[in-house]
């Protein structure tokens, strides 16, 4: 306990290094010493960052309880908590039907897989017993900047990645509805059967929110299942200032929402939510007689195990329930609004600096801010070499152990930095520090 508490104390200490970087062959000595402090105020690398001590306490209690989520019989409190919070999340989305449903899963990729699985079963229930051979050539649509897990799910489910059609995005990374319509019509002319569209609310790289009402209109016209990947952006529903960015999400058939991202709940905590009863998770039910007996002495609706792909399922609900109880919805709202303000501040500072260039001139839509840094001596090198500068700047930052943020190329854009704000410990002084540190480490390149 003392080792863990000392580690947490150091995590929040802005004077400590964000990591003690060593190469893989050097890492066999000390688990925590060489790990990355993802709760460090200057850790900006992933969408899930920060360390919420309330959620951590919940995770410790969960580990102590060491139970399984498949039946009420062995997880009575946790299964009731899950039911309550799933209902609450569905209501926040805007679904008033009492028959909305959901389940917590091990991450957004699995949640996205559930969305396709449930939609396919609703349209083609024979898939469960007869397999893919009985189906027409079904295709689904995702934007060219959608999450890669959609293609992965298509591969796992036997549909094949060639049957995932990528839809063009505009310059801000949003799916273009007219392109979606065009792709649907083209697929029909080829003899393919469209059945599913994934729209994103808060994209991974650019933080883009798609025009959900326009996409919903197209899905309704063509009778397609509309799924919204709000793994990153779902938390914005808790902010009265910013929830309008997800307008139209209530028209979706399914939504994924990861509280372990913007809400700061410790990993993992992801929900797949289904908007109306469609024998929601019957696709997974096998009614194992040694677990899911119908004649138990309690309401067996709380035996949720047969809804999931897994048998054993980790208790992910308590840390979310405890944190929500402690903070309240307004506490989450204040936290999320502060992230948005930090992103706005960071954008304004970079906008004024000659040696930084924003990937988008317009102010950020979310907490993602994408930019290039130009060292003074290399400011006029050919564009094809720009990515080398940003790679080296990041490499120096890791070796110096002072901050962590992400970089990547995207389409025709060479490597750029991506800063995201979802860390409870981050303050404006940390933002200033990162800017100064990039300049310090890059000035001699």
Image (cartoon, grey):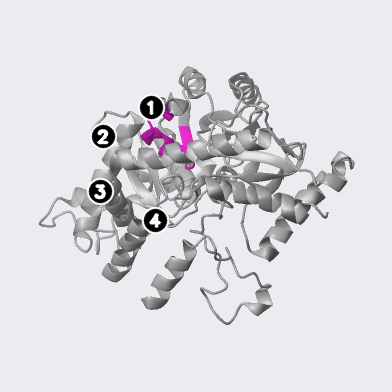
Quadrant showing the C terminus:
bottom right
In front here: 242 or 341?
A: 341
Circles 4 and 3, Cβ within 8 Å, touching? The answer is no
Real-space Cα separation, disc 4 to disc 3, in angstroms: 14 Å
N-terminal of the pair, mark 1 or mark 4, is 4
175 relative to 331, above or below: above
Q: Can you give x and y, in whole percent of width and height, for residue 200 in the image?
A: 52, 34
Can residue 179 be seen by looking at this rendering? yes
Residue 52: image tag: 4
Kindly indicate whether the residue at mark 1 contacts the one at mark 2 (C-beta within 8 angstroms): no
Q: Nearer the viewer, mark 4 or mark 2?
A: 4
For marks 4 and 2, give the CA distance. Answer: 32 Å
Left or right, 286 with respect to 81, comes to: right
Q: Mark 2 or mark 3, which is nearer to you?
A: 3
Residue 157 image point, x, y percent:
52, 48
Numbered range of the magenta stretch: 227-243
Q: Residue at x 52, y 36 (%)?
A: 202
Question: Which residue is the site of mark 1?
Answer: 250
> Which residue is under mark 3?
325
x and y, in percent, of residue 110 in the image = 47, 50
**Under tag 4, what secondary structure?**
loop
Residue 70: give x, y in percent of width and height. Answer: 29, 58
């Amino acid at each position: 306990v003392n080792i863990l508490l000392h580690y947490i104390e150091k995590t929040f200490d802005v004077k400590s290094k964000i990591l003690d970087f060593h190469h893989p062959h050097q890492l066999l000595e000390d688990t925590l010493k060489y790990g990355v402090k993802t709760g460090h105020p200057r850790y900006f690398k992933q969408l899930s960052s920060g360390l919420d001590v309330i959620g951590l306490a919940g995770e410790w209690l969960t580990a102590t309880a060491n139970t399984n989520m498949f039946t009420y019989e062995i997880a009575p409190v946790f299964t009731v908590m899950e039911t309550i919070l799933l209902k609450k999340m569905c209501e926040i989305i805007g679904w008033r039907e009492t028959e909305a449903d959901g389940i917590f899963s091990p991450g957004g990729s699995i949640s996205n897989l559930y969305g396709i699985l449930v939609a396919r079963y609703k349209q083609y229930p024979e898939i469960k017993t007869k397999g893919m051979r009985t189906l027409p050539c079904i295709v689904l649509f995702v934007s060219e900047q959608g999450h890669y897990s959609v293609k992965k799910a298509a591969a796992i489910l036997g549909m094949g990645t060639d049957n995932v059609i990528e839809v063009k995005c505009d310059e801000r990374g949003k799916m273009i509805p007219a392109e979606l319509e065009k792709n649907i019509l083209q697929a029909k002319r080829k003899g393919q059967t469209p059945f599913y569209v994934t729209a994103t609310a808060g994209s991974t790289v650019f933080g883009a929110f798609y025009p959900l009402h326009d996409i919903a209109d197209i899905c309704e016209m063509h009778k397609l299942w509309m799924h919204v990947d709000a793994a990153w952006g779902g938390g914005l529903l808790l902010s009265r200032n910013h929830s309008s960015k997800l307008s139209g999400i209530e028209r979706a058939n399914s939504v994924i929402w990861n509280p372990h991202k913007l809400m700061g709940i410790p990993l993992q905590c992801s929900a797949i939510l289904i908007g109306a009863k469609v024998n929601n998770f019957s696709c997974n039910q096998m009614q194992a007689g040694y677990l899911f007996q119908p004649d138990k002495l309690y309401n067996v609706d709380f035996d949720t195990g047969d809804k999931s792909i897994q048998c054993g399922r980790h208790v992910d609900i308590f840390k979310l329930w405890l944190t929500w109880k402690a903070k309240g919805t307004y506490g989450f709202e204040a936290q999320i609004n502060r992230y948005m303000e930090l992103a706005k501040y960071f954008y304004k500072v970079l906008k004024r600096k000659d040696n930084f260039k924003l990937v988008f001139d317009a102010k950020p839509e979310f907490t993602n801010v994408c930019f290039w840094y130009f060292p003074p001596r290399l400011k006029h090198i050919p564009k094809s070499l720009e990515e080398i500068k940003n790679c080296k700047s990041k490499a120096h930052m890791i070796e110096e152990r002072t901050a962590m943020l992400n970089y990547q190329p995207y389409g025709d854009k060479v490597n750029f930095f991506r800063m995201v704000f979802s860390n409870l410990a981050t303050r404006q002084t940390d933002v200033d520090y990162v800017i100064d540190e990039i300049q310090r480490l890059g000035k001699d390149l």
